[in-house]
Every structure is written in structure tokens, then in C-alpha cells.
Amino acid sequence: QKEVEQDPGPLSVPEGAIVSLNCTYSNSAFQYFMWYRQYSRKGPELLMYTYSSGNKEDGRFTAQVDKSSKYISLFIRDSQPSDSATYLCATKAAGNKLTFGGGTRVLVKP
Amino acid sequence: NAGVTQTPKFQVLKTGQSMTLQCAQDMNHEYMSWYRQDPGMGLRLIHYSVGAGITDQGEVPNGYNVSRSTTEDFPLRLLSAAPSQTSVYFCASSLGGTGSSGNTIYFGEGSWLTVV
């Protein structure tokens, strides 16, 4: 079993819809949870991170962590074609070592 | 401020050849790491460093070597390339500690490596 699991998609939505992305993780010791966005042939860029359980909002993006169920979510409101990318969830351990899910490809259609 | 710079961007190697992927950062970051990305598998940690002179293995270290003689540079060496090492390689760097600065991990643009 992989430490972080993520549905590969692709997830196709019309412009303006809410995009909902999810990951599960297995190690209950993880405290930091990240979401990265990766455009084709580019490096990942950090969207948001959360510490422990709870919600965090940044503009159109909301990240949620439920440690009791080991579930990580990212919501993108009012999605735009420029949001089309692969979204990677990750957990962070000491030494800033990241464990990634496999990524979900998102396509926002105009 | 160039961020994290990786070279080369593309490379084709023959089986058995050796090469070094270069990674440099100009942000005075203590932590640096190397990941490889294969289709459907996300990024997997190869080696990491928490400071000059300190390195350790990640999830998939076999066939790779690293050293960290300066804060700025963290080269990744392929000792004897194999087709299984065909992948996209990403270097990352960050400050240590908790809070926003310690949790913002920057990635380079990637190095595409093909071993034939």
C-alpha cells in the first residue's frame, strides 16, 4: 500500500465549476499536508499547506485535512481554464522530506 | 534571484554511462533534495540534505550518489545508467524550521533523462 493515495483522473469540469480533489494517507504521524500544482513539463509549485486537521482558504482554493479519517481534500471554486494542470498532494516529514500521491490531472473546459 | 536551477534540461545516455545532474539554488536554503517522477507514481525521494556535508537516502536511492560540499549546490550522480533510470528528475530546496518559510519547498524545472 502506498503511503499517499490519489485518484489519477483525469477530472474534466466546465469552467466555473467546483473542482474537488482528494487523497488518503496511511501514516498517522504526518502533521503537514501540502498541495502542489504542476503544469505540463514544469516543476511542481506549492499551492497551500495545512498543519494538522482543519481548513485553510486562499482565494479560490480551500484545503481540508481530516486526521481521524486520514483524508486530505482540495477544492477549487470558480474554476478557470488556467487551472488545468496536475494536482499533487503530499505529506511532509522531518528534513522536509515529501511523500507524494500519484497526482490528479484536471481539465477545465471553457 | 534565480530560485532552483537544474541542468541539463534534457539528456540521452547509453546504458552504463555515468553523468551528473546539477542543481543550484541562490536562496541560502539549508534543505535540498532530489526526486524522480515516473508516470502515475508522483514524485519519489532519491536523496536529501539538511545542510552542507550532510546527506541521507530517500525512498529510491539505488544507483544514485550525492554530495553537498556547499550550501548552494547539490549534484546527483548516476554511476552506471540503466533504462530503469529513465525519468524526470526534480531538485527541491527550502529553509528549515516550521512556519511558512520552512514549509515552502521550491522545485526546479526538471531534467528529462532517457537511458537507451
Image: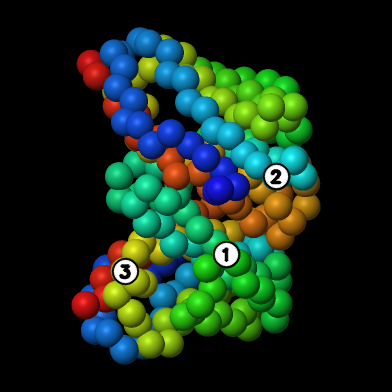
Amino acid under disc 2: Asn
- According to the image, label 1 marks what residue? B59
- Circle nearer the N terminus (1, 3): 1
- Percent position (x, y) of residue B111? 35, 65
- From this viewpoint, which residue is outermost toward the front? A1
Q: Are marks 2 and 3 on the same chain?
A: no
Q: Secondary structure at mark 3?
A: loop
Tally the numbered discs: 3
- According to the image, label 2 marks what residue? A27
Q: Chain of mark 2?
A: A
Q: Nearer the viewer, residue A4 or A64?
A: A4
Identity of the residue drawn at 62% across and 39% down: A25
Q: Residues within 10 Å of mark 2 (few under 14, many from 20)?
A: few
The image quadrant of residue A68 is top right
Q: Residues within 10 Å of mark 3 (few under 14, many from 20)?
A: some
Gap between marks 2 and 1 measured at Cα = 15 Å
Q: Is residue B16 left or right of residue B36?
A: left
Tell me if I can see residue B2 in this picture: no
Q: Are marks 1 and 3 on the same chain?
A: yes
